[in-house]
Amino acid sequence: MTPAGGSAMTGEVRIREAERRDLEALAALWLEFMEFHASRDADLAVCDGAEGHWKKWAAGKMESRDSVVAAAERNGRTVGYAVATIKERSPVFKRRRYGEIMETAVTADARGGGIGSRLYDFVMSWLKRKDVDWAWLEVAAKNETAGEFWERKGFRPFLETHQRDI
């Protein structure tokens, strides 16, 4: 989730499953999302050609029956998206099948208007229809706004990832 702080645009928001025709607009929003993160943590900077890789990845998610890509539109413009997929953990765990919310982003000028919550509702409804009763996600450590958003949605810290250069 990207941070609040932009001005909320006016107009009705429509949340729907994304289609291949949406890839250019979604990729532009993904680049904004990644630039935001890279400005806070250089280890999240993307490589040359990353947009093409992301479009291929997102197209695969759109085609998978175990994934969903949701798009938020306002006045014909893509203002947000979310990607979720169904995964399984190792058989050593009792709770194996889960939904992973892989990405959620709202463009800067549309933040604070409830679009992130609407995308969340869409994804959670999709997961429930797929008989998934447990979800998790990762939040960039330097994105406190996203952490607060997800905690308001009932998520709690579960695992921590630590990294270092060698």
Image: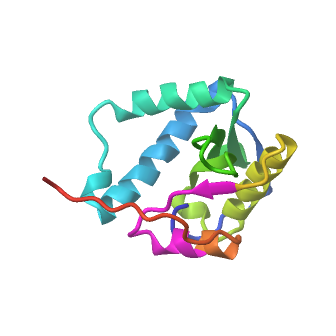
Q: Is residue 132 magenta?
A: no
Give left or right: position of 78 versus 5.
right
Residue 75 placed where, x, y %? 73, 48
Q: Which residues are magenta?
A: 135-148
**Image position of 164 with respect to 99: above or below:** below
Residue 163 placed where, x, y %? 28, 59
Coloring basis for residues = rainbow
**Image position of 29 with respect to 42: above or below:** above
Which residue is painted at 29% across and 62% down in the image? Answer: 41
Residue 15 placed where, x, y %? 77, 48
Residue 25 placed where, x, y %? 56, 37
Which residue is painted at 60% across and 66% down in the image? Answer: 111
Residue 118 or 108: which is nearer the viewer? 118
Which residue is painted at 42% across and 45% down in the image? Answer: 31
Looking at the rendered structure, the number of numbered marks drawn on it comes to: 0
Give left or right: position of 78 versus 120.
left
Which residue is painted at 68% across and 47% down in the image? Answer: 98
**Image position of 34 with respect to 112: above or below:** above
In which quadrant is the N terminus drawn?
bottom right
**Does residue 19 show up?**
yes
Which residue, as the protein is rendered here, is positioned at the far front?
92
**Image position of 143 with respect to 94: above or below:** below
- Residue 71 quadrant: top right
Residue 39 or 7: which is nearer the viewer? 39
